[in-house]
Image (spheres, rainbow, N blue to C red):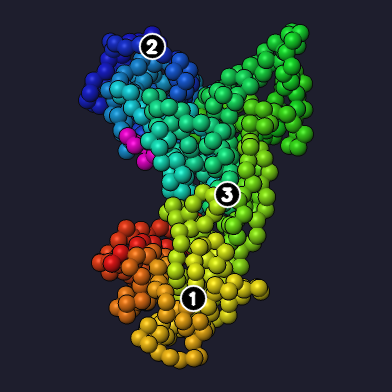
């Protein structure tokens, strides 16, 4: 840059003359652009800091009478920029302070234009770049390289983040959605990364095993991308806004690695030859397969020794080469690791991320996934054996076709399970002797229980003596009724002294209302009613297993 520049905190006074600051040449990706005036342009960008091995967010500031030269630059473009670094610019977007680079149109070169027609719309979610996600170093917004990236569908992303956060509660972990969006694929990446440079980097292998073994997460995760950890990479990790630059650099590193092995007479390491591509998004695969290489490579999705992982995260391409055994390949959903009913046998231990997982029994109905998920997520389950806390009497109202009852009978240490519904119970024989099935409405079932505890001698009530000696310490309701009706069952049990001195409840709130505002009012009012003695520690969760029109409420009671 021939002209020097001056920086002023006033936007109107920004000029490209007589400024102080280090001059840099940097490759960036444009996340958003803001045309402040006919002569002043701001662009929020992301770039990789090679020296500190982290990626950062900043702004490009262009002051010129010739901004028309930059009219073709849009979000997604990769630029090579020469400019003067400043450290006090406030972005025009919604994000926090970030460093800025002052430059001129002639010092900006487009390296890789973003093709919306071929790739889809590129956007940047500023909300993800906040003081609670990356960490701040002065005025710099910095992100540590991820440990894992999980590919999921957009509709389940928010709920999956909550589940993953509950699995990794350590303050050294950050779990968030990648800021890069592709409307064409409708997929998202959930990023697991260290919360700061000072944090102890969590163990990669342990994090991988926790993800792929989890019966709650696995039905919703499409792919697991890894290789961002130096402990498993074959050649140094590469990150850049430019795919051409990143891939060419990776090829050079692999070529040097192969040559060093050939030159060594003692090395037993394999030459990189049989390689599988593992990419997000998928549209880059054909381009990479046609890339001219200085050495032979056998690309194969089945017969391979190494995995070349290429993912776009927060606008940057991240490329790593790992051995096959250090990478998990495949769609977790295809493993059929669905939330299961039978948990009495411990799951097969995975000694490495690539180990196959045994298929498990199918549920009687999808609803069983809800009760297992809420119990696992609330730490109601022991690690081994897979049994919950002991209960005297579990009541399941709205039990048909039997998913919750079957789960309770096989996975929960309950002495007796009272299953209530006008519909049929489709649990195949032999049915557990712990199950007492009343084919009546919920109100009638509660009235029967009340009459038993009041001394009724009716001989028509099945297991009367067993029910008389127990009170409800696990109340469940997944009936297709309004939330008001669901919680009323619980309150009626309380009024008739049918609840044990201590217990838990799980209730599904179903949206049976005609309008959204009625549904929201109903949830709010029912939660307020539940938040009274003796009920406490009440949570309302939109489970992964819930439909869009239902939520699960859980809590305790203690008299």
Please state the horizontal and vertical placement of residue 127, each as a whole percent of the image.
37, 41
Residue in view at x 49 percent, y 87 percent: 461
Main secondary structure type of the part rendered in magenta: loop
Element type at mark 3: helix
Task: Examine the image and state in which quarter residue 490 appears.
Answer: bottom left
| Magenta region, residue range | 125-133
Q: Residues within 10 Å of mark 2 (few under 14, many from 20)?
A: some
Report, in whole angstroms, how far the alpha carbon at label 1 lies from the one at label 2.
75 Å
* In the image, residue 151 above or below residue 172: below
Please state the horizontal and vertical placement of residue 305, each as a whole percent of the image.
73, 29
Please state the horizontal and vertical placement of residue 476, each as a whole percent of the image.
44, 69
Label located before the other in sequence (1 or 2): 2
Q: In the image, which is nearer the foreground, mark 1 or mark 3?
A: 1
Q: In the image, which is nearer the foreground, mark 1 or mark 2?
A: 1
Element type at mark 1: strand
Nearest the viewer among 296 and 552 is 552
Q: Is residue 5 visible?
A: yes
Relative placement, left or right, of 24 versus 228 is left
According to the picture, the residue beneath numbered tag 1 turns out to be 418
Element type at mark 2: strand
Q: Residues within 10 Å of mark 3 (few under 14, many from 20)?
A: many
Residue in view at x 64 percent, y 62 percent: 362
* In the image, residue 399 above or below residue 75: below
Q: In the image, which is nearer the foreground, mark 3 or mark 2?
A: 3
According to the picture, the residue beneath numbered tag 3 turns out to be 218
In the rendered image, residue 199 lying in the magenta stretch gets the answer no
In the rendered image, residue 128 lying in the magenta stretch gets the answer yes
Label located before the other in sequence (3 or 2): 2
According to the picture, the residue beneath numbered tag 2 turns out to be 23
Relative placement, left or right, of 264 versus 425 is right
Report, in whole angstroms, how far the alpha carbon at label 1 lies from the one at label 3.
31 Å
């Amino acid at each position: 840059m021939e002209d020097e520049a001056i920086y002023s905190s006033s936007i109107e006074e920004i000029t490209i003359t007589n400024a102080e600051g280090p001059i840099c040449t940097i490759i960036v990706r444009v996340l958003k652009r803001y045309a402040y005036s006919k002569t002043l342009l701001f662009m929020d960008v992301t770039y990789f800091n090679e020296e500190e091995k982290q990626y950062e967010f900043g702004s490009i500031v262009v002051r010129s009478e010739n901004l028309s030269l930059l009219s073709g630059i849009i979000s997604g473009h990769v630029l090579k920029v020469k400019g003067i670094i400043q450290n006090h610019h406030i972005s025009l977007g919604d994000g926090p302070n970030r460093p800025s680079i002052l430059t001129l149109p002639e010092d900006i070169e487009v390296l890789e234009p973003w093709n919306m027609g071929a790739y889809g719309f590129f956007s940047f979610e500023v909300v993800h770049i906040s003081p609670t996600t990356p960490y701040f170093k002065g005025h710099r917004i910095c992100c540590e390289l991820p440990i894992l990236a999980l590919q999921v569908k957009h509709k389940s992303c928010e709920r999956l983040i909550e589940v993953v956060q509950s699995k990794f509660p350590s303050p050294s972990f950050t779990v968030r959605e990648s800021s890069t969006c592709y409307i064409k694929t409708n997929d998202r990446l959930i990023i697991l990364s260290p919360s700061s440079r000072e944090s102890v980097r969590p163990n990669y292998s342990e994090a991988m095993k926790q993800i792929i073994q989890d019966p709650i997460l696995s039905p919703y995760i499409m792919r697991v991308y890894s290789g961002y950890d130096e402990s498993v990479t074959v050649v140094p990790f590469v990150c850049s806004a430019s795919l051409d630059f990143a891939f060419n650099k990776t090829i050079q590193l692999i070529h040097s690695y192969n040559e060093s092995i050939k030159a060594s007479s003692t090395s037993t390491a394999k030459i990189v030859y049989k390689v599988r591509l593992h990419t997000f998004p998928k549209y880059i695969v054909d381009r990479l397969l046609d890339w001219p290489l200085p050495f032979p490579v056998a690309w194969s999705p089945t017969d391979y020794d190494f995995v070349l992982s290429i993912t776009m995260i927060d606008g940057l391409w991240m490329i790593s080469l790992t051995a096959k055994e250090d990478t998990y390949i495949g769609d977790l959903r295809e493993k059929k690791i669905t939330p299961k009913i039978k948990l009495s046998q411990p799951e097969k231990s995975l000694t490495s991320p690539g180990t196959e997982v045994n298929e498990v029994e199918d549920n009687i109905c999808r609803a069983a996934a809800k009760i297992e998920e809420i119990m696992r997520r609330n730490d109601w389950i022991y690690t081994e054996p897979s049994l919950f806390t002991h209960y005297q009497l579990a009541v399941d109202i709205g039990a048909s076709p039997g998913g919750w009852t079957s789960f309770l009978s096989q996975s929960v240490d309950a002495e007796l399970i009272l299953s209530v519904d006008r519909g049929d119970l489709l649990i195949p024989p032999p049915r557990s002797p712990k199950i007492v099935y009343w084919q009546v409405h919920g109100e009638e079932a509660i009235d029967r229980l009340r009459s038993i505890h009041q001394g009724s001698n009716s001989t028509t009530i099945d297991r009367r003596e067993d029910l008389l000696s127990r009170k409800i310490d696990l109340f469940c309701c997944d009936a297709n009724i309004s939330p008001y009706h669901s919680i009323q069952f619980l309150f009626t049990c309380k009024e008739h002294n049918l609840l044990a001195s201590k217990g838990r409840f799980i209730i599904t709130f179903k949206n049976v209302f005609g309008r959204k505002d009625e549904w929201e009012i109903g949830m709010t009012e029912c939660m307020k009613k539940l938040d009274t003695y003796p009920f406490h520690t009440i949570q309302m969760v939109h489970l992964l297993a819930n439909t869009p029109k239902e939520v699960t409420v859980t809590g305790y009671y203690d008299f």
